[in-house]
């Protein structure tokens, strides 16, 4: 059978989640992934599952995703190693502390409660932190998970519900005629679908352009590093104002930190970490946690992620083509959003609407001068 | 930016010989090696404080080792030699080094990769116990440290090293309880015509065997290792095997050394983004080269056991050839004849090596594919064969990198060096071609680097 | 030399004796010994495995398997098989806690 209710291009976390949610509602689904599910940004990211610090435009969907993360084991048969460790965002100057205070007010309007910590209480609670950290904002409900296993688990759960998951399947072109989407595969075969979800990550804008939806999408490869296993000592996932370094300790004991960007080649589908970036990242990580100086770096990695000019993803209907919906360009913070992004896209495909507030993520924002701005902190 | 240099990675027989062959033409290569002293594993030198006679260290190979060491020592003023230096990353035409505890970078114009090899391992119950070592480790302990890996030892596995190490131990006065070879005697018979072409090497092998037998050291062929047994101190107390006839036998000992041939170290080649191919002969993915050792990237040359196992004598030849081909590419076209001669000599060595590694001492495929469920495969992460098989079933995957992502296989400090050969066999299972599990990708750092190394900033040049 | 160790010395020519400490306990070893040799001529294990009560004592001795990392008393990491022991050196083999959270 080559005709589906919905075709999804892109087997990242959001695409796999969409396939799962659509299948759960009984729709016939084809998930088309050029490589392997969760092999790019969804599988190789830091693994932070946080709402704190997000752009207000994302907070609605982040809250919805949070509920899904807590329910992951029931939904897809694995908890994805999701742990509610809390997320601690650190300020390294009085200005940054003021930013954290201001953000707390914003978060409150989305029912997200944050606890501010002054220098003294920060030191008391997290004695391993270095002098660089002067204060912090703690979000107790946030946490972390294992990105390597979540997207593949969603794709397996979708398949178990009847979804057709086609990996190593590249879509070379798509068009809409006679009310149907016709997708031409690299193999020469064709797939037809009534609705099309473009969830192709860093390649999303290229697919959008087939239908006349034009946006400039950038590309980046977050440079990730991991140490040997250490006795547990960190607790929450750590971030900083400005976002230039982020650190967490996984249940197995290794400490993962990310900072800066590696080499990303979208055309070759190739990414690699860079030594200079790794070195600078190590310096930043040690400035936050001095005792890491004596830990061994054992591995570095990266993957390709799409970035939008205003730093927040596109999510919503195509301005040009009926039945086409976009969700891409998560700009390095899509992991937490992934489960709900899939749920929302499933609703858009089947109902044409979603109860989740995503208006500020609409594609149409690029058809006029952009008013959205990056998160201040 | 500092001038790009000719860089040789590794100071074993291949790297040393390459250096000599460059210096004779007036080049000044940079030689980078992890060890404290040159020689590689085979001609490893003890620290000066523990120096011993070449005869005591290298036995039959003393003259060869001495010639190589003296040659290399004589060019000390004509090369830039960086011992105890780890190349932790390769990026474009630069190398990132851990030198003197600090992160450094060097640019290369030409690169000779002579990265060597390590033992190929098939895990067996108890192989992570204190007192269980690779055959290579057993030899290094004796050669470089003048210690045995135990007071009484058993060696098992297969390959020429098995008999050599047993001979060296017994000769040093350490009790060798048994030499246990998984290869059957008939395999050697089948390989005999080709083995005879090995001349000196083959004769040595026969000598070791006769020597061991004359001293009534049990040498058993066609065995299957069952378990390395722990004592009350949680360390090796013995080994249980199944004989060719199917009977269980136990040998008490305080140390075991084992291995199943060697495996090329290709991590730097991978980071250089060289082209690889699965070499069925060598049972691993190796960087591809032309007939004269040129890699797929212009200016990169392959030499020694890092490019496929051919042994120490061949390593000297490929080391010299890499240097000559490099010089040829720089314009010394008159070297063509010597290069051809070297390549011909190397080709003449292949049938012997093939008979040795793939017939007489063939890798015991079945043993590797059928490692019991409760045996640890990945010793860094403590992952057992059952964990890998279960994940492969649950996810319908046999791709090494995917299984790595799902289970942490090969994610520990060794980055898959020790476990990949066995994990490949376990994943391939009963029927599948070994290459179908894909190539395990190397990610920097090549070996662990303390974060402290990055705190001083990065100099451009060592 | 005591026989309680994993490694067994073979008779060689005179070498200079030096002293180091392993987890606080002084031991007498030879110049030119690696940290691994120094420890294992007195003990059978080098360190405790992170994820269980298993013991480890190195494996490849050529800096490949990375199974023999220990510490100096200042916290600095050293690979026991490729680091020569120094006179007066303090070696710490205990890693100070399990990693399972």
Image (cartoon, coloured by chain):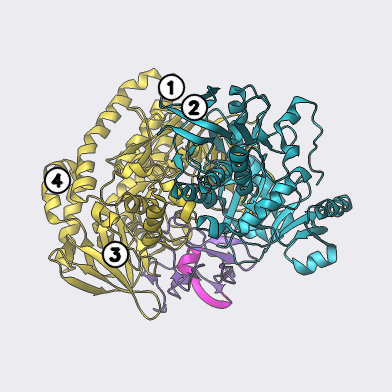
Chain colours: A cyan, B yellow, C purple
Sequence order check: which comes first, mark 1 or mark 3? 3
Q: Quadrant of the C terminus of chain C?
A: bottom right
Instruction: Name the image quarter holding residue A358.
Output: top right
| Foreground: disc 2 or disc 3 | 2
Label 4: chain? Answer: B
Helix, strand or loop status at disc 3: helix
Label 1: chain? Answer: B
Do the residues marked 4 and 3 share a common chain? yes
Depth check: B256 or B225 in front?
B225
- Give the residues drawn in magenta, as a range: C23-38
Helix, strand or loop status at disc 2: strand
Q: CA distance from mark 1 to mark 4?
A: 39 Å
Residue A64: percent from left, percent from top: 68, 52
Q: In this image, B119 relative to C95: left or right? A: left
Q: Which residue is mark 3?
A: B169
Sequence order check: which comes first, mark 1 or mark 4? 4
Q: In this image, B259 relative to A294: left or right? A: left
Q: CA distance from mark 2 to mark 4?
A: 57 Å
Asked if the residue under mark 4 is in contact with the one under mark 1, i.e. CB atoms within 8 Å, the reply is: no
Q: Which residue is mark 1?
A: B329
Depth check: B134 or B279 in front?
B279
Sequence order check: which comes first, mark 4 or mark 3? 3
Crowding at mark 1 (Cα within 10 Å: few <14, some 14-19, many 20+)? few
Q: Which residue is mark 4?
A: B191
Residue A122: percent from left, percent from top: 80, 64
| Foreground: disc 1 or disc 4 | 4
Depth check: B377 or B46 in front?
B377
């Amino acid at each position: 059978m080559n005709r589906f209710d919905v075709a999804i291009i892109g087997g990242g976390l959001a695409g796999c989640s969409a396939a799962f949610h659509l299948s759960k509602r009984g729709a016939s689904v084809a998930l088309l992934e050029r490589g392997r599910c969760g092999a790019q940004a969804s599988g190789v990211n830091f693994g932070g599952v946080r709402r704190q610090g997000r752009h207000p435009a994302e907070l609605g969907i982040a809250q919805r995703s949070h509920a899904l993360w807590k329910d992951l084991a029931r939904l897809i048969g694995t908890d994805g190693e999701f742990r509610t460790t809390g997320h601690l965002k650190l300020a390294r100057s009085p200005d940054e502390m003021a930013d954290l205070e201001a953000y707390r007010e914003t978060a409150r309007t989305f029912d997200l409660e944050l606890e501010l910590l002054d220098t003294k209480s920060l030191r008391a609670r997290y004695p391993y932190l270095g002098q660089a950290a002067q204060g912090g904002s703690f979000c107790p409900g946030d946490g972390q998970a294992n990105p390597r296993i979540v997207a593949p688990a969603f794709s397996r759960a979708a398949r178990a519900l009847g979804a057709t998951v086609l990996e190593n399947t590249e879509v070379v072109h798509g068009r809409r005629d006679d009310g149907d989407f016709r997708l031409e595969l690299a193999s020469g075969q064709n797939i037809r679908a009534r609705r099309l979800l473009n969830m192709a990550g860093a390649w999303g804008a290229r697919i959008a352009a087939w239908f006349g939806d034009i946006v400039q999408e950038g590309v980046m490869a977050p440079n990730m590093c991991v140490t040997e296993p250490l006795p547990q000592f960190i607790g929450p996932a750590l971030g900083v104002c400005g976002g230039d370094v982020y650190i967490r300790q996984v249940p197995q004991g290794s400490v993962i930190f990310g900072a800066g960007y590696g080499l990303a080649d979208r055309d070759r589908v190739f990414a690699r970490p860079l030594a200079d970036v790794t070195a600078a990242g190590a310096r930043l990580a040690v400035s936050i946690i001095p005792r890491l100086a004596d830990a061994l770096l054992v591995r570095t990695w990266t993957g390709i992620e799409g970035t939008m000019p205003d730093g927040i993803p596109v999510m919503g209907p195509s301005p040009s083509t009926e039945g086409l919906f976009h969700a891409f360009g998560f700009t390095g913070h899509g992991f937490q959003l992934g489960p709900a992004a899939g749920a929302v896209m499933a609703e858009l495909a089947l109902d044409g609407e979603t109860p989740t507030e995503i208006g500020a993520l609409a594609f149409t924002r690029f058809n006029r001068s952009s008013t959205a701005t990056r998160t201040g902190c | 930016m500092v001038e790009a240099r000719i860089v040789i990675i590794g100071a074993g027989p291949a790297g040393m010989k390459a250096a000599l062959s460059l210096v004779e033409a007036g080049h000044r290569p940079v030689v980078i090696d992890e060890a404290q002293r040159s020689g590689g594993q085979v001609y490893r030198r003890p620290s000066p404080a523990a120096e011993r006679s070449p005869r005591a260290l290298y036995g039959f190979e003393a003259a060869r080792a001495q010639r190589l060491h003296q040659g290399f020592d004589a060019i000390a003023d004509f090369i830039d030699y960086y011992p105890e230096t780890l190349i932790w990353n390769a990026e474009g035409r630069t190398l990132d080094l851990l030198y003197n505890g600090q992160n450094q970078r060097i640019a290369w114009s030409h690169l000779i990769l002579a990265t060597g090899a390590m033992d190929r391992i098939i895990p067996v119950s108890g192989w992570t116990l204190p007192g269980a070592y690779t055959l290579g480790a057993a030899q290094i302990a004796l050669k470089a440290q003048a210690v045995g890996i135990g007071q009484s030892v058993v060696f098992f596995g297969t390959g020429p090293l098995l008999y050599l190490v047993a001979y060296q131990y017994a000769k040093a006065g350490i009790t060798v309880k048994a030499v246990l070879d998984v290869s059957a005697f008939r395999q050697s018979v089948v390989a005999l015509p080709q083995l005879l072409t090995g001349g000196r090497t083959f004769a040595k092998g026969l000598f070791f065997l006769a020597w061991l037998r004359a001293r009534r050291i049990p040498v058993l062929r066609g065995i299957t290792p069952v378990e390395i047994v722990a004592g009350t101190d949680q360390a090796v107390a013995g080994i249980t095997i199944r004989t060719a006839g199917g009977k269980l036998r136990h040998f008490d000992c305080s140390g075991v050394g084992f291995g199943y041939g060697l495996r090329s170290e290709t991590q730097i080649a991978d980071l250089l983004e060289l082209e690889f191919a699965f070499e069925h002969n060598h049972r691993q993915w190796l960087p591809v080269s032309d007939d004269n050792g040129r890699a797929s990237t212009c200016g990169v040359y392959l030499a020694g056991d890092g490019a496929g196992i051919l042994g120490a004598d061949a390593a000297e030849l490929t080391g010299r050839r890499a240097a000559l081909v490099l010089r040829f590419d720089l314009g010394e076209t008159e070297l063509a004849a010597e290069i051809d001669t070297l390549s011909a000599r190397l080709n003449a060595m292949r049938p012997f090596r093939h008979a040795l590694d793939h017939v007489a001492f063939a890798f015991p495929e079945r043993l590797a594919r059928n490692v019991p469920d409760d045996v640890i495969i990945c010793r860094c992460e403590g992952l057992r064969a059952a964990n890998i098989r279960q994940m492969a079933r649950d996810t319908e995957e046999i791709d090494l990198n995917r299984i790595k992502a799902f289970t942490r296989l090969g994610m520990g400090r060794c980055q898959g060096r020790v476990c990949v050969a066995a994990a490949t066999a376990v994943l391939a299972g009963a029927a599948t071609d070994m290459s179908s599990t894909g190539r395990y990708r190397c990610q920097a750092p090549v070996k662990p680097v303390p974060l402290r190394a990055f705190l001083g900033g990065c100099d451009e040049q060592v | 030399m005591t026989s309680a160790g994993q490694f067994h010395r073979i008779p060689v020519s005179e070498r200079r004796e030096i002293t180091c400490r392993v987890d606080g306990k002084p031991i007498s070893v030879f110049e030119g010994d690696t940290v691994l040799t120094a420890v294992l001529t007195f003990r059978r294990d080098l360190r405790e495995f992170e994820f269980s009560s298993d013991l480890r004592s190195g494996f490849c001795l050529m800096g490949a398997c990375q199974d023999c990392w220990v510490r100096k008393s200042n916290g600095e990491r050293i690979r026991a098989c490729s680091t020569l022991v120094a006179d007066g050196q303090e070696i710490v083999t205990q890693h100070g806690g399990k990693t399972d959270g």
